[in-house]
Image: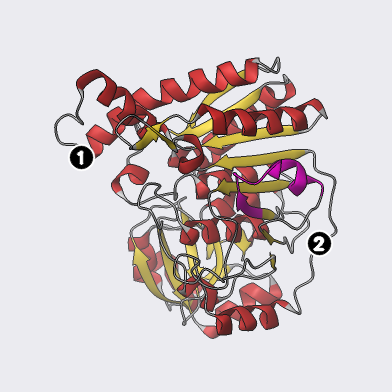
């Protein structure tokens, strides 16, 4: 990701009024390890597919050190597809049939996940630490009951002194493999951090952080040390993965940062190749790019609602009066304030609420389906029951089921 110098200057100006929250002790840390760190080892053919245990060993040692201090660490790992591809090549000497289909990539993920967990188990056992495989799909963190189940399970794992190894459940969740992605587990890690109310989220890859310019084009480009607000100009400049190996890139990392900091969790993007990088980050050293949280605490239900930002089922557009009422007066959304509907959603789904310009105002639980809302948009509350023939209340999104952004 490479915002122009003008965009960087503007983002810093926009950041000035934003106050960072007081730094809290690091008790719980989510660490996402990128594809290139896990499967960056070159095999006999020169391909970067095999699991890089040397790279993993150094990162595991750092995590074990934090664990020994009493910190709870959750590892979100990438690399299953790459690891599975190497297993298949060793067996067959080729990629097999239909290597570009989603089903084939799911098969690779299933093969590689076993190899990944064997490597993690072996490396962490050198430090006397047990690990627990935790496969999570998108719906697990966007449906209230599953969200709570994930949280309770991970809490139990952590309380037992075990380190959870989290990965996307690629065998049943095709979004990442088909190109509609969390972003190489970037957004998944932010959702897990949100679910567990983590004190810090760290995304480790090969990039040193967020650069002022594209370092692949400008070798003199500098890393931006801190960002307190993700501006529209920075988002516009976000780019996909440079090397085409991972499914992430700075665009997905910005989306992860947006979710994390709006949930009260600071986030750091840094190179996993940097010496002792996790210790240095936890000690407060200015390494990589730090996204500073501006919210101190978000109530549990609203934390769950905010995960819907990354996977909402649709959106409603609201007029200026409704947007002001939501932002400044904490009101519920009524049918009269809706000007348009986007997407298809059912009653109880998480939806986005956007103003006329498309700026995200909030996300929340829809009281009515998209079809119902389309019928009552712009109408008075007293007309709702007559128009629909059923009635769940005048609030199309109640303020108790809404999280402002």
On the picture, is 306 further left or further right than 239? right
Task: Looking at this view, name the residue that lies furthest to the left.
Answer: 97
Q: Position of residue 343 (x, y in %)?
A: 34, 62
- Is residue 364 visible to us here? no
Residue nearest the viewer, comparing 289 with 149: 289
Residue 317's quadrant in the figure?
bottom left
On the picture, is 390 further left or further right than 269? left
The residue range painted magenta reads: 268-283
Residue nearest the viewer, comparing 39 with 66: 39
Mark 1, other Cα within 10 Å: few <14 / some 14–19 / many ≥20? few
For numbered disc 1, what is the local secondary structure? loop
Q: Position of residue 138 (x, y in %)?
A: 44, 42
Q: Name the residue carrying label 1.
A: 101
Label 1 to label 2, Cα distance in Å? 46 Å
Give the residue displayed 63% in from the left and 34% down from the top. Answer: 59
Residue 226's quadrant in the figure?
bottom right
Q: Position of residue 133 (x, y in %)?
A: 53, 23
Residue nearest the viewer, comparing 182 with 227: 227
For numbered disc 2, what is the local secondary structure? loop
Q: Does the segment drawn in magenta span residue 282?
A: yes
Q: Name the residue carrying label 2.
A: 21
Q: Nearer the viewer, mark 1 or mark 2?
A: 1
Give the residue displayed 73% in from the left and 21% down from the top. Answer: 161
- Is residue 131 visible to us here? yes
Mark 2, other Cα within 10 Å: few <14 / some 14–19 / many ≥20? some
Give the residue displayed 45% in from the left and 58% down from the top. Answer: 391
Q: Does the segment drawn in magenta span residue 177?
A: no
């Amino acid at each position: 990701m490479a915002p122009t110098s003008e965009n960087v200057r503007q983002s810093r100006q926009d950041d000035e009024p934003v106050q960072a929250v007081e730094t809290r002790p690091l008790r719980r840390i989510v660490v996402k390890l990128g594809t290139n760190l896990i499967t960056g080892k070159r095999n006999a053919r020169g391909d970067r597919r095999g699991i890089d245990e040397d790279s993993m060993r150094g990162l595991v040692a750092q995590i074990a050190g934090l664990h020994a201090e009493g910190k709870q660490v959750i590892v979100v790992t990438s690399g299953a597809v790459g690891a599975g591809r190497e297993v298949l090549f060793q067996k067959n000497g080729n990629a097999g049939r239909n290597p570009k289909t989603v089903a084939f990539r799911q098969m690779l993920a299933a093969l590689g996940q076993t190899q990944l967990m064997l490597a993690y188990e072996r490396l962490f056992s050198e430090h006397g630490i047990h690990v627990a495989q935790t496969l999570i799909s998108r719906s697990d963190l966007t449906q209230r009951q599953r969200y709570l189940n994930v949280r309770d399970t991970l809490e139990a794992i952590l309380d037992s002194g075990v380190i959870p190894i989290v990965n996307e459940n690629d065998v049943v969740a095709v979004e990442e493999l088909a190109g509609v992605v969390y972003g190489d587990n970037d957004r998944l890690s932010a959702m897990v951090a949100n679910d567990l109310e983590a004190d810090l989220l760290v995304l480790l890859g090969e990039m040193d952080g967020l650069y002022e310019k594209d370092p692949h084009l400008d070798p003199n480009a500098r890393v931006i040390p801190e960002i307190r607000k993700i501006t529209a100009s920075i988002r516009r400049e976000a780019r996909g993965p440079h090397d085409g190996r991972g499914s992430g890139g700075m665009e997905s990392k910005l989306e992860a940062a947006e979710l994390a900091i709006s949930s009260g969790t600071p986030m750091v993007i840094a190179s996993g190749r940097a010496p002792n990088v996790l210790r240095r980050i936890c000690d407060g050293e200015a390494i990589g790019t730090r996204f500073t949280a501006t919210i101190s605490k978000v109530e549990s239900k609203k934390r769950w609602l905010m995960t819907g930002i990354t996977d909402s089922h649709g959106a409603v557009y609201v007029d200026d009066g409704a947007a002001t009422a939501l932002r400044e007066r904490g009101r519920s959304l009524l049918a009269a304030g809706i000007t348009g509907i986007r997407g298809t959603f059912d009653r109880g789904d998480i939806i986005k609420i956007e103003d006329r310009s498309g700026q995200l105002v909030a996300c929340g639980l829809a009281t009515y389906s998209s079809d119902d809302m389309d019928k009552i948009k712009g109408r008075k509350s007293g007309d709702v029951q007559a128009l629909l023939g059923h009635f769940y209340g005048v609030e199309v999104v109640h303020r108790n089921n809404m999280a402002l952004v």
